[in-house]
Amino acid sequence: MALARDAIARELGERPPTPCLPRPGWLDTPGAVFVTLTRHGRLRGCIGSLEAHRPLWRDLEANARAAAFDDPRFPPMTPAEWPDTRVEVSVLSPARPMDFSGEEEALAQLRPGIDGVILEYGWHRATFLPQVWEQLPDPLEFMAHLKNKAGLAPDFWADGIRLSRYSVDKFKEDAS
């Protein structure tokens, strides 16, 4: 949490660049992280990596800055917004492909509240973190919104759809 908050604060000019301090060794292992920012309980930015391709601490810092300044759904964060912004970090497990013969079977395998899901079809791709189950607890509705996010019709289904799932270790600041 401190690494994500510090990366954004430095970009905002709220903190001077800090020297590279000693880190626990596990932060140097490759990892995939999503950083979600909220203000007053509403989404303010969410960017992340689905696959581990750089050290965890680098992925965390890069995605924290991207969530604050590069999420195309929002303008770049301003210093005035920063004090009311809460940070949530989700460290993803490696995604595992799901094996199913149709949508009904795929939906039956989903574990609401546990599974993050990646949907792929041709060049269409989208993911929902496990936290999205809080707003969309029904697997059919969850999948319809995920397809829509990927640019597909909510009722679309084809044999070429690929689904993978992952879990997260979530760290969240208090809303105080």
Image: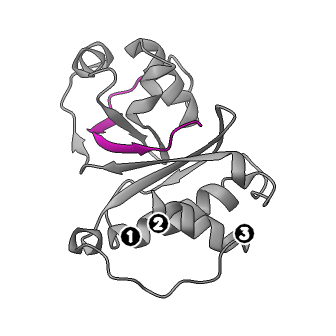
N-terminal-most mark, 3 or 2: 2
Give the vertical position of 118 relative to 152 (above or below).
below
Query: Which portion, as a residue range, is magenta?
Result: 157-176
Look at mark 2 in the image and give the residue it sits on.
Answer: 3
Label 1 crowding class (10 Å Cα cut-off): few <14, some 14-19, many 20+?
Answer: many
Which of the two discs, 1 and 2, sits closer to the camera?
Answer: 2
In the drawing, does residue 98 fall left or right of residue 1? left
| Residue 56 in the image, given as x and y percentages of width and height | 34, 67
Q: Is residue 156 visible?
A: no
Residue at 45% x, 51% y: name it.
34
Q: Earlier in the sequence, mark 1 or mark 2?
A: 2
Q: Quadrant of the C terminus?
A: top right
Q: Which residue is mark 3?
A: 12
Q: Tell me the quadrant of the picture where the N terminus can be found.
A: bottom left
Q: Nearer the viewer, residue 115 or 152?
A: 115
Numbered circle sitting on residue 57: 1
Number of dots carrying numbers: 3
